[in-house]
Every structure is written in C-alpha cells, then in structure tokens.
Image: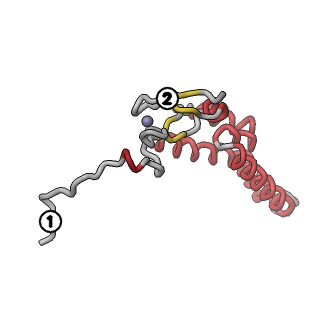
Amino acid sequence: MAPLVRCSHCAKNFAVSRWDQLNGFLVPCPSCGIFNGRSWNIRAVALAGLFLHVFSFFLVMRPARALVSALAFGSLAYLTSSVATSGAYPALEVTWYVLFLLSPIVIDAALLVRHQIKLGQPSSQTPVAQTTVVAAPTHIRPK
Ligand SMILES: [Zn+2]
C-alpha cells in the first residue's frame, strides 16, 4: 500500500509512492494543488553528487528521468573524451576532467534550488474547484 502523507496546506491525507516519500520529491496535493515534499539538505545533495556522480541523479529526479539524464551525460562524456583526452591539449584535458567530475554536483544543485522554490507553492494542476477568483483592484483603472 502506498504511504499516506498529510498536506502541509490543507491537512488532508493523500497517497504518494514509496520512492517519492523516501526522496521527498514534490507531489501536488490532490485537494488544494500545493506541492508537498521534504526540504532537501544542500550538503547531502552535494556529497551525493561528488561520490555517486551520475547515480546521484536518482536522488534528485524520478527514476525514468534520472536514467535518461545519466545515459545522456555518459554519452556526452564518452563522445567528448576521445578529443579532450587525446593529450594534444593538456589544458582542454584538465578542463574536461573538472567538468566531468563537477557537472553532476552543479546539475543536482540546480534541481535542489528548483525543488526548494516550488516546495509549498501551488502546482499548475490546481483543482478548478479550489481556485479563487481574485477581483481586479478598483483603484487601478485605465484612463
Ligand atoms: Zn492540500
């Protein structure tokens, strides 16, 4: 059975997948449409990026996207490695290794920032019944 979480906004319970709960991924509440999830720790995400490299994508992305991203990263690294590490351009080789080692951390950090911004914000799938019509301010009128 999928675990239940309590919405931080409307306090209603709803089901999330175990993987979503484990990683604290953003899941929109079916009642109010607010993104629920766990606040991510920047140090944990940076360490995962450093030691797990592309496998850290599985901690910050859902499995299908993480797999595609890891394969794309690996393919790009493989295609560029023969040119960059041929030994003809030492500076290019050093740059390639630095980019290869640090890119997953930068990607993870960017996703962490996006996650933290969206946490507690309304999703685009806000239920129609819950949307409120905000009246236009009356003091701003075209002349
Ligand atoms: Zn809710």
Q: Identify the residue position indicated by label 2 in the image.
A: 13
**Badge count:** 2
Q: Residue at x 40, y 32 (%)?
A: 10
Q: Where is residue 26 in the image (x, y as percent from the top left)?
A: 54, 40
Q: Which residue is drawn at 56% across and 41% down?
A: 112
Question: Mark 2 or mark 1, which is nearer the start of the sequence?
Answer: 2
Dot in front, 1 or 2 = 2
Residue placed most toward the observer, 28 or 56: 28
Q: Does the residue labelled 1 lie within 8 Å of ligand 1?
A: no
> What's the residue type where badge 2 is placed?
Asn
> What's the residue type where badge 1 is placed?
Arg
Q: In this view, does 122 lie above or below 42?
A: below
Which circle marks residue 61 in the picture? none
Q: Do the residues labelled 1 and 2 touch (CB within 8 Å)?
A: no
Q: Which residue is drawn at 42% across and 40% down?
A: 32
Q: Identify the residue position indicated by label 1 in the image.
A: 141
Judging from the image, what secondary structure is the residue with disc 1 in?
loop
- Which image quadrant: the N terminus? top right
- Which image quadrant: the C terminus? bottom left
Residue placed most toward the observer, 87 or 44: 44
The Cα atoms of the two marked residues, 1 and 2, are separated by 43 Å
Left or right: residue 49 versus residue 27 is: right
